[in-house]
Amino acid sequence: MSKRILVMNGPNLNLLGIREPGIYGTDTLESLCEQVKEAATAYGATVDCFQSNHEGALIDALHAAMGVYDGIILNAGAYTHYSYAIRDAIAAIKLPVVEVHLSDIHAREPFRHVSVIEPVCVAQISGLGVGSYLKALELVCGEETI
Ligand code: DQA
């Protein structure tokens, strides 16, 4: 059965391409999503992309993913560092969620070193740019052990 994967991006990631390109690169969010969709064909998987700047909308999307998707690739943006509500939503839905970041959060400001969602995600992949999403796709498509 082909896997259905949801790629979720949180606040400010709609500005990819123009937002601090020295840190986040020059790819737009649309291009990032296209690259993940293209890579998914190799696994026979399908990918949908969702972005919101709003915590509640991200939580609603996590809830709605139950029974629809087989796995989630989540870049929660700054919510990563303090949203216990998103953490609780991930724990509630019982779907494998891979936490991703374009930049290396461990090599940046101290407040970014903490991820409150990491304990409820199956893996954290950080610092590989779009490659973080591609590596996460490998994981959720079962090509690597989580
Ligand atoms: C980010 C890292 C976060 O610290 C930051 O708030 C973001 C993007 C990343 O992809 O590198 O918005 O998640």
Image (tube, rainbow, N blue to C red):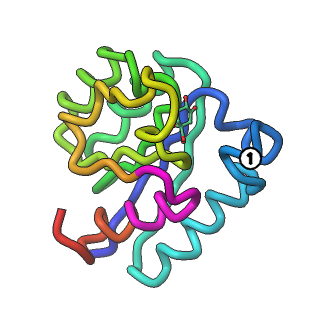
On the image, the x and y values in percent for residue 43 come to 39, 80
**Residue at the spot x=23%, y=73% of the render?**
144
- Asked whether mark 1 lies closer than 8 Å to ligand 1, one says no
**Residue at the spot x=44%, y=28% of the render?**
112
On the image, the x and y values in percent for residue 134 come to 47, 66
Q: Is residue 46 visible?
A: yes
Does 41 sit above or below residue 133?
Answer: below
Q: Is most of the magenta stretch helix, strand or loop?
A: helix
On the image, the x and y values in percent for residue 125 come to 37, 53
On the image, the x and y values in percent for residue 98 come to 32, 49
Along the line of sight, the residue nearer the viewer: 80 or 52? 80
Side of 61 relative to 27 (left or right) = left
> Does 104 appear in magenta?
no
**Residue at the spot x=33%, y=74% of the render?**
2
> Does 128 appear in magenta?
yes
* Occupied quadrant, residue 20: top right
- Residues in magenta, as a range: 126-136
**Residue at the spot x=72%, y=60% of the render?**
31
Does 145 sit above or below residue 42?
Answer: above
Q: Kindly identify which residue carries mark 1.
A: 22
Q: Is residue 68 visible?
A: no
Which quarter of the rendered picture does the C terminus lie within? bottom left
* Occupied quadrant, residue 86: top left
Furthest residue toward bottom = 42
Does 84 sit above or below residue 68?
Answer: above
Instruction: Specify the quarter for ligand 1.
Output: top right
Kind of residue at disc 1: Gly
Does 7 sit above or below residue 86?
Answer: below
